Image (cartoon, coloured by chain):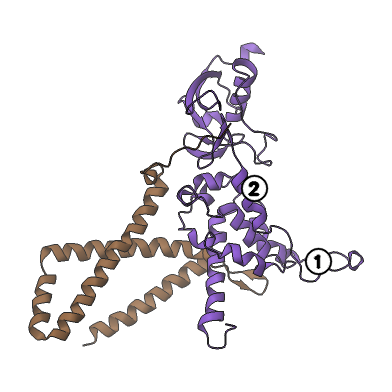
Chain colours: A brown, B purple
Amino acid sequence: MSPYYRPVRFDWWRKRRAYTLFVVRELTSVFIAGYAIVLLLLLRRLAEGREAYEAYLQWLATPGMMAFHIVALAAAVFHSLTWFSLAPRAMAVRIGERRLQPRTILWANYAAWAVVSAIAAWMVLRA
Amino acid sequence: MTSSVSSATITLEVLRYRPGRDQAPAFQSFQVPYREDWVVLDALNYIKDQIDGSLSYRWSCRMGVCGSCGMMVNGTPRLSCAAFLKEYYPATVRVEPLEHFPIERDLVISLDDFMQKLPAVRPWIVRQDDRPLDAGEYRQTPAELDWYKQFSMCINCLLCYSACPVYELEPRFIGPAALALVARYNLDSRDQGREQRQEIAAGPDGVWDCTLVGECSTVCPKDVDPAGAIQRLKLSSALEWVKNVVLPWGRR
């Protein structure tokens, strides 16, 4: 007598809220990939000359592309926040006999993020 | 005595499957007395004693230690000895066998897959140098014990496998509990078996299959945090790879 195998539901990610949130978190990468393509195209237009570059900038200013950037930013922020909140579980840092508090690791990650963002902002805005 | 017991009842919908008789599992409803201090397992015992003796399920200790009474209670993997009826009353309670495992009969699942994976990760202390018995025990400080203790609390109840969508889609995945045991022994100061476990833990069915849904840790009745254990194994495996492959003075 053989055991019964329950079929896998195609909509398994709807079974639990946590599954749905997980799938949303994974799907944010689609927007980040899309943003990377937009950025690569920008470099290509820049190489093609001033006219192509300015036409591309005009296209970026259309409402559709503005909306895309807002959604991509929201996706990146959501992904980053969930990623940082998980960091203390992946990193167990031991100093001597004591284990570093998870909160310390969390804030160290945010601090590193702030520093990198500040450097990036300085590079972009100094012109 | 009888006058102090209320006549309230609660409905249990239990998934039943009798191999050889049923083509597929189906729910059967039972009315059982409602008691505030009853857990789902008490209700199942009532059904078996008073209503239908053929109902099959596993249980032993009734106190969250043996790990044998895991079931889906209203869609969530729980120890049925720790799921109180009052959490659900007056609503119906739906009891199913743990998901992602084949059903042997009623609420009894097949453990074969886990039983093959468990010894594969060598969940015991591995030594390169076996000391003679008269050399005494391998000693450990409380701080060294603390380093892995959380991961050693696993009772093999398999709730984590039932909560893991990766295990459902990719049944070859070694899975949360077995990988938490890899972390438990790798982090043990007396153990020297990390390299032996690495082949399984960092192999094609190991930690890199995990996409960090995190539900294994949410449902764990012993706060083992298998998801955390797996992420730590990922980090240490990645660092080892950098050391051996990327850096010019690496071993390979």
Q: Residue at x 33, y 82 (%)?
A: A119
Disc 1 marks which amino acid? Arg
The type of residue carrying mark 2 is Met
The chain containing the residue under callout 1 comes to B
Q: Provide the residue designation for mark 1.
A: B139
Q: Hey, which quadrant is residue B106 in on the image? A: top right
Name the quarter where the N terminus of chain A is drawn: top right
Judged from this view, the residue extending furthest toward the right is: B134
* Tag nearer the camera, 2 or 1: 2
Q: Position of residue B203 (x, y in %)?
A: 55, 64
Q: Is residue A5 above or below residue B123?
A: above
Residue B115's mark? 2
Left or right: where B147 falls relative to B162: right
Which residue is found at the position 47% from the left and 72% from the top? A108
Q: Chain letter of disc 2? A: B
Q: Is residue B44 left or right of residue A27?
A: right
Query: Measuring 76% from the left and 71% from the top, which residue is drawn there?
Result: B128
Q: Secondary structure at mark 2?
A: helix
Where residue B92 appears, as percent x and y from the top left, is 46, 25
| Rendered position, B195 above or below B73 | below
Q: Is residue B57 above or below residue B207?
A: above
Residue plotted at (65% across, 19% down): B49
